[in-house]
């Protein structure tokens, strides 16, 4: 296990225990979340070494790597994903006139294929071999392994997207530097992450599915995300809600909490979470951060 000695956002070395969580999805192992005493950033500490993390994804039920729809939760997830993918294409197009996109953590390629069908120049990054093979076979999309990110030319992409990906990346600051290098000076980044200050996060506590230890290494609030962006000289343009996430996360959380699919209860909690998330505070279950590349002067 790897121990983090300094906060990855503010470099503070004092942490307090935040929560003890179990990997309900796969291993049954327990992990400790700590909170930085200075900036409030929450993260796993200690955490598996990067070389060990792949085994925690090694399941056919890990939906983002699978072309199947096993079980009720998987079926609902796939149905909603088809709808949200079309909304993402419209959202991204709203913020840029450019037509080149890099989707990091592109999974099995469904979203990139939609961009391709809308005449975008597409490129994906995906660490999972079977997901890359599926995307190449079914959509003829160019997808690189994660270790090939450094081979992408500098200042080459109009848009970079990370849909629920940044929380998985071991080298957080190194990844932010790579994003800045690859993005054009007038480019836009879309980063979607779970929001640990949402109602459903507070309601489910250690059973909150979006903690997803140890696959999710970090747990952002709006304040810690803003500090990370400022540290890396990015400008925050907008914060947008992902309203469907509260329902999906609540379905998984109910299963972890009671060991059964309590669909009606999950819908109620998801609905309440969205209702409690006032627009001025944007405390939805997951948030999209729209980010501009700030030029160095």
Image: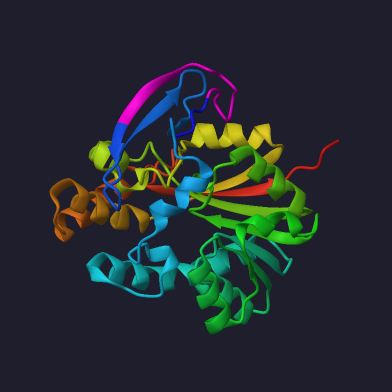
> Is 182 situated above or below 68?
above
Residue 17 sits inside the magenta stretch? yes
Q: What x and y, as percent, mark residue 280?
A: 45, 40
Q: How many marks?
A: 0
Q: What x and y, as percent, mark residue 154?
A: 80, 55
Give the residues in magenta. Answer: 5-19
Residue 233, located in which quarter of the rendered image? top right
Left or right: residue 4 compared with residue 183: left
Left or right: residue 269 compared with residue 285: left
Work out which residue is located at the far right of the displayed protein and give it. Answer: 297
The N terminus - image quarter: top left
Residue 260 sits inside the magenta stretch? no
Residue 23, located in which quarter of the rendered image? top left
Q: What x and y, as percent, mark residue 44?
A: 42, 34
Q: Does the magenta stretch mainly form a helix, a strand or a loop?
A: loop
- The residue that appears at 32% across and 64% down in the rendered structure is 61
> Is 45 situated above or below 249?
above
């Amino acid at each position: 296990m790897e121990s983090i000695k300094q906060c990855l956002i503010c470099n503070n070395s004092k942490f307090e225990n935040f929560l003890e969580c179990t990997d309900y999805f796969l291993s049954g192992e327990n992990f400790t979340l700590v909170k930085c005493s200075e900036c409030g950033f929450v993260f796993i500490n200690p955490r598996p070494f990067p070389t060990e993390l792949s085994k925690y994804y090694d399941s056919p039920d890990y939906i983002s790597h699978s072309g199947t729809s096993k079980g009720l939760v998987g079926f609902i997830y796939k149905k909603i994903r088809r709808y949200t993918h079309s909304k993402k294409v419209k959202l991204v197009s709203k913020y840029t006139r450019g037509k080149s996109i890099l989707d990091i953590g592109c999974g099995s390629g469904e979203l990139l294929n939609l961009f391709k069908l809308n005449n975008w120049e597409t490129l994906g990054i995906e660490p999972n071999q079977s997901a890359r093979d599926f995307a190449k076979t079914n959509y003829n999309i160019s997808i690189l392994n994660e270790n090939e990110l450094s081979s992408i030319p500098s200042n080459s992409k109009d848009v970079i997207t990370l849909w629920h990906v940044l929380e998985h990346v071991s080298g957080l600051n190194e990844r932010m530097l790579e994003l800045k290098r690859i993005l054009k000076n007038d480019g836009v980044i879309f980063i979607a992450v779970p929001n640990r200050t949402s109602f459903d996060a507070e309601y489910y506590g250690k059973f909150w599915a979006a903690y997803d230890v140890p696959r999710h290494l970090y747990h952002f609030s709006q304040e810690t995300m803003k500090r990370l962006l400022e540290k890396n000289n990015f400008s925050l343009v907008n914060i947008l809600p992902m309203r469907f996430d509260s329902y999906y996360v609540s379905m998984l959380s109910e299963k972890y909490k009671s060991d059964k699919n309590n669909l009606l209860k999950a819908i109620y909690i998801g609905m309440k979470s969205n209702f409690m998330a006032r627009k001025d505070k944007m405390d939805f279950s997951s948030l999209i951060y729209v980010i501009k590349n700030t030029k160095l002067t």
